[in-house]
Image (cartoon, rainbow, N blue to C red):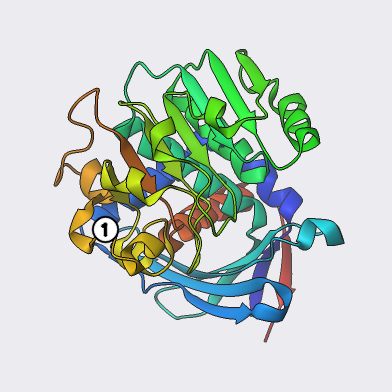
Amino acid sequence: MEILWLAQEEVTSVIDMSSDMQVVERAFRQHGLGRVQMPPKSYLYYTAYNGDLRTMPAYLEEENITGVKIVNVHPGNPDRGLPTVMALIVLISPETGAPVAIMDGTYLTDIRTGAAGGIAAKYLARKDSKVIGLVGAGNQAKTQLKALCEVFEPELVRVTSRTKESSEQFIREMADITPCEIRYEENIKKVCDCDILVTTTPTRKPIVKAQWIKEGTHINAIGADAVGKEELDPELLIRSKIIVDDVIQALHSGEVNVPLSKHYISENDIHAELGEVIVGLKPGRTSDEEITIFDSTGLAIQDVASAHLVYERAVSKGLGKHVLMF
């Protein structure tokens, strides 16, 4: 039996943000309607190396798409010349259980997470949003900005990161993505003066204070994706409308996990899952004064939907290598 192998270069050549946002939004819609199978991601913790490994299976029943992603998160990897996040995705035939394709999932992880942020902002941010703030300037900040530019026409982007050099590199790389000014800010407080704030850091101590956030702001909280991680002041969650990608995963490892464990908030303070907002089961933003937070843990449905798009396009273009497995 042969399996299609797709390397990162082949994956990136057939995927774009606009198309990925369409398939990811469809996946969230199916999630909101309860038409997916997706157990919570499971973790192995490599404490000695400040890293972890996650497995993420999913089945989109209506579209008959299934697969699993294996992904790591090692924040120290850039010092080793490796990406913080690396992943493989296996697509599987629901009919036989046989593997159909194996592909690099590293870039897909970045783009599908960015896509989710853009979709969340589409439903939760003010329609007149013009200023974007980015806390963090890595790969995820890039795909978040790309996705937001698919939905909005920003006039200013403020960015800050651990080093000025990384922000300046980000500005150079993103200059062609948006014609608006992208400005480095040394002070996180200044970055928070925005309409849409995106946080993409691995911190375990809140770095965004509640008093910095004005009424009407939407926040994509992306960085907290494991137990103990948090980027936002718990007081900010108390005064905000919280929408998560998946309640079970968010309770375990989302932005809400630490405030919940410390009883700043309760599970009842989670307003909705994004899919429920998309299909109209629950309202999103209901006023220009609300502060909304999208707590993104990253879902396997995003991965398999994106991977299936790549697979279809790669097959049509004759890309990849067919590997004899058994």
In the image, residue 290 sits, relative to residue 310, either above or below, namely: above
Residue 115 appearing in the image: yes
Pick the residue in front: 94 or 85: 85
For residue 20, say whether it is visible: no
Residue at 42% from the left image edge and 52% from the top image edge: 296
- In the picture of the structure, the residue carrying the numbered disc 1 is 265
Left or right of 70, for residue 26: left
Quarter of the C terminus within the rendering: bottom right
Most extreme residue toward the bottom, as rendered? 326
- Residue 13: image quadrant is top right
Give the residue furthest to the front.
211
As rendered, which of 184 and 23 lies closer to the eye? 184
Residue at x 45%, y 40% (from the top left corner) = 209
State the SS at label 1.
loop
- How far across and down, in percent of the image, does residue 293 sit? 35, 42
**Residue 281 in the image: above or below residue 95:** above
* On screen, residue 210 above or below 67: above
Which residue is depicted at the point 45% across and 55% down?
Answer: 302
In this image, 206 relative to 85: left or right?
left
Q: From the image, which quarter does the N terminus lie in?
A: bottom right
What percent of the width, then of the height, locates residue 269? 21, 54
Q: Is residue 145 above or below residue 246?
A: above
For label 1, count other residues whose C-alpha is less than 10 Å away and answer few (under 14), some (14-19) or many (20+). Answer: some
Q: Foreground: 35 or 227?
A: 227
Residue 155's spot in the image, x, y percent?
52, 12
Residue 228 on image: x %, y %: 49, 67
Looking at the picture, which amino acid does disc 1 mark?
Ile
